[in-house]
Image (spheres, rainbow, N blue to C red):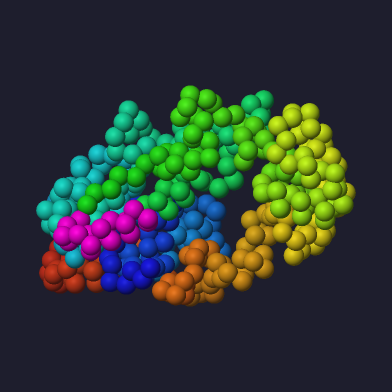
Amino acid sequence: MNLDGVRVLDLTRLLPGPYATQLLADCGADVVKVEDTGAGDYARSMPPLTEDGHGAVFDAVNRGKRSVAIDLKSDAGQEAFHALAADADVVVEGFRPGVVDRLGVDYDSVRETNPSIVYCSLSGYGGTGPLSDDVGHDINYVGLAGLLDMSRESTEERPRVPGYPIADMAGGLFTAFAVCGALLSRELGDGTGEYVDVGMSDVVLSFGQAVAPEALRGDDPRPGETPLTGGYPWYDVYEAADGYVTLGALEPQFWRAFCETVDREEWIDLHMTDDPAERAALRESLSELFSSRTRDEWLETFEGVDATLGGVFTPAEAVEHPQIEARGTVTRDDRGEPRVGFPASGSRIADDPGGSLPGQGEHTEALLRAAGYDDTALEELRTDGVIR
């Protein structure tokens, strides 16, 4: 997973696209943010803000990147972009479908400049279909994909907005996967690039494989009733004396270990019962049991026991958890500030170097100079407001 030598032109902003390219940057890719000459990436100033006054989301997903500021609405700006694209491997864009065509930086145009380019478009609904031109945000995409409906305990409750922006992160993750796959395809093939169209709603729907078979048969999986959404009392969330615990005893050996640890051997044979009354009674008994101790007391009780019991932690607790610390997922940047880094480790995955945050247009001159622009040409672009 060493992407050293791979250059990515990043036309995205806010969260989904920058998360995708941050993953690539964490693997060693040279990611160049292409921002406009006005406000640039909106996330630079979007709350919540850090102590330095930066947008916290921007800080989280733009480490180790470089930035150029170019006015793509101008002919000269488009020419500058194509000069950069000539030596690039990847372009990732996150505009609404059709915008890159109007800006002259669409796949067909870039392919004329660089036939080996891997070009990925990331949008809410994808580039085709009746909703492709619609505006939207994460809540809209998870609503379409069925996730929002399944986020509640029963149909009597209102759908619950997920605590994380699932579509944004899923779309970014799949974009990074698609880019790596396309690069591999190029290297194993004839050297030509390809175009990939990623729709965030499609990716979230793909995450629904546990309920999709029923839906595809014409049935309609209901929240709180499927095996992994609370239908099983041995796979659910329970309230402890001061928090919550998770029980995931799908396999009989885990359920047996749980029952033996809490001295309820009479529950063992109830595992996978189809009797609604038995399930309801068991759930009530489990609720009563878990309420008798605190979360941490339950975790201590089951330490070293293969019973699939865990805790429900707040985000602040999660980033300080010993397991997360041991994995090195939370790292520190070049200023010593903590960040959630690349979520994997391996023999060819570099240690997270942190990386600095690029100022808007900080690397414009250096990158365009490397692309063949001399002092006179750069000064003309700057005077005309094409670059910043």
Front position in the image: 219 or 224: 219
Relative image position of residue 342 (x, y in whole percent)? 48, 65
Quarter of the picture holding the N terminus? bottom left
Front position in the image: 37 or 4: 4
Q: Which residue is pictured at 30% across the width and 53% down the height?
A: 92
Relative image position of residue 148 (x, y in whole percent)? 55, 35
Q: Which residue is pictured at 44% across the width and 41% down the height?
A: 206
Relative image position of residue 121 (x, y in whole percent)? 30, 47
Q: Is residue 167 above or below residue 185?
A: above
The answer to which image quadrant residue 303 occupies is bottom right
Relative image position of residue 341 (x, y in whole percent)? 50, 65
Residue 187 among magenta residues:
yes
Examine the residues drawn in magenta and state their main secondary structure. helix
Q: Is residue 236 above or below residue 57?
A: above
Whether residue 296 appears in this view of the structure is no
Whether residue 347 appears in this view of the structure is yes
Front position in the image: 360 or 148: 148
Q: Is residue 29 left or right of residue 240?
A: left
Q: Which residue is pictured at 41% across the width and 61% down the height?
A: 23
Q: In this view, does 37 lie to the left or right of 207?
A: left
Quarter of the picture holding the C terminus? bottom left
Q: Which residue is pictured at 19% across the width and 72% down the height?
A: 370
- Region in magenta: 176-193
Q: In this view, does 367 lie to the left or right of 179?
A: left
